[in-house]
Image (tube, helix red, strand yellow):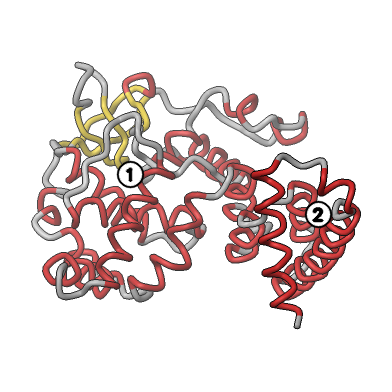
Amino acid sequence: MAREDLLGGLSSLATSGTIRQLRREQLVAAPWQPRRYFERAPLLALARSIRAEGVRQNLVVRPHPQQNGLYEIIAGERRYRASDPAIVQQLDLSPEEAARLVGDPPATLPCLVVPLSDPEARRLSAVENLQRENLDRIDETTYCLLLLQDVLGYQAAPQVTLSQIAQEIGRRLHAFRNHPEQFAQERAAVQTLFDQLGTQEWTSYATNQLPLLQLPDDLLEAVRQGRIAGRSALLIARQTDAALKTELTQKALAGAPFKALTTLIQAQQGKAWRVTAHQVRAALGVRQLEKLPPDKQKRVIALLEQLQQELQ
């Protein structure tokens, strides 16, 4: 992944800001920042390091676009969280863990203050985070989505959810794939972005990763934490039977592979049609048909005639 290619003109701007020591209360997380899950053990290890040696890498921030005196975090939210004086409560540390947390949290944090627009901030945040080796699949998908919003010029209203943004961008990507002659310019821009990322084809991203952001919260978090594979979660989400979804989720969390889940679904579908056939047979007595309203009786008889032809 070529960081400079992805940043474009931001590359020099991102290193030409002003270094300032800012208090924690002056810093706020960006509302569009997708990363909300931070693994407990690495966060605790960082908290210990910060109390012992201080924050060794600058956070990247920008002046808050609406609130004077505050700064929005572009990169470095993990360091911000690890420096929290209330880390013991935040991570619900045991007395033994808390005893090993030696030293005081820093009163201020070193920050690189850079004046950035909303699109510039999103792009810089996405590029910086995509460089990390421990990025989970959901975060990777979301940061790629931020870059796609920038490339396609899509500005979502504040009330639009991440799932809705993913749905809209997914709709556009599928249109680009299905109608290349109509969207040649947009398709080329997306292709250039994914060439620069160098991780996968954009068509694969649209089919296999972007739908993850539309998962229900419980499945989304399970995928984020690596407890359920992405395609298994998508398979579970497509089911309409609540009892079957619960059973599939439990088996997936217990380590069942994708093939085992599909086998269970096929078996359940086999049971379902037998139940349906039994129910229909019980309702098809002459007396039951005679009791139906004329319009409904006519439709049922037409369906029976059609079924008889199919079975011959």
Q: Which mark is residue 165?
A: none
* Of marks 1 and 2, the one in the foreground: 2
- Dot 2 crowding, Cα within 10 Å, few <14, some 14–19, many 20+: some
| Residue closer to the observer: 288 or 208 | 288
Q: Quadrant of residue 189?
A: bottom left
Q: Amino acid at mark 1?
A: Ala
Q: Residue 279: image x %, image y %?
A: 86, 54
Q: Is residue 65 left or right of residue 266?
A: left
Kindly give the residue lying farthest to the bottom in the view shown.
312
Q: Is residue 136 left or right of residue 100?
A: left
Q: Earlier in the sequence, mark 1 or mark 2?
A: 1
Q: Residue 28: image x %, image y %?
A: 35, 27
Q: Is residue 13 left or right of residue 207?
A: left
Say if 300 sits above or below 56 in the image.
Answer: below
Q: Amino acid at mark 2?
A: Glu
Q: Residue 248: image x %, image y %?
A: 76, 58
Q: Quadrant of residue 98?
A: top right
Q: State the SS at label 2.
A: helix
Q: Residue 257: image x %, image y %?
A: 73, 71
Say if 152 sits above or below 162 in the image.
Answer: below
Q: Which mark is residue 75?
A: 1
Q: Which residue is mark 2?
A: 247
| Residue closer to the observer: 67 or 106 | 67
Quadrant the N terminus occupies: bottom left
| Residue closer to the observer: 270 or 243 | 270
x 37%, y 42%: residue: 76
Q: Is residue 32 left or right of residue 221?
A: left
| Residue closer to the observer: 74 or 93 | 74
- Count numbered badges in the picture: 2
Quadrant the C terminus occupies: bottom right
Quote the CA–CA distance across marks 1 and 2. 39 Å
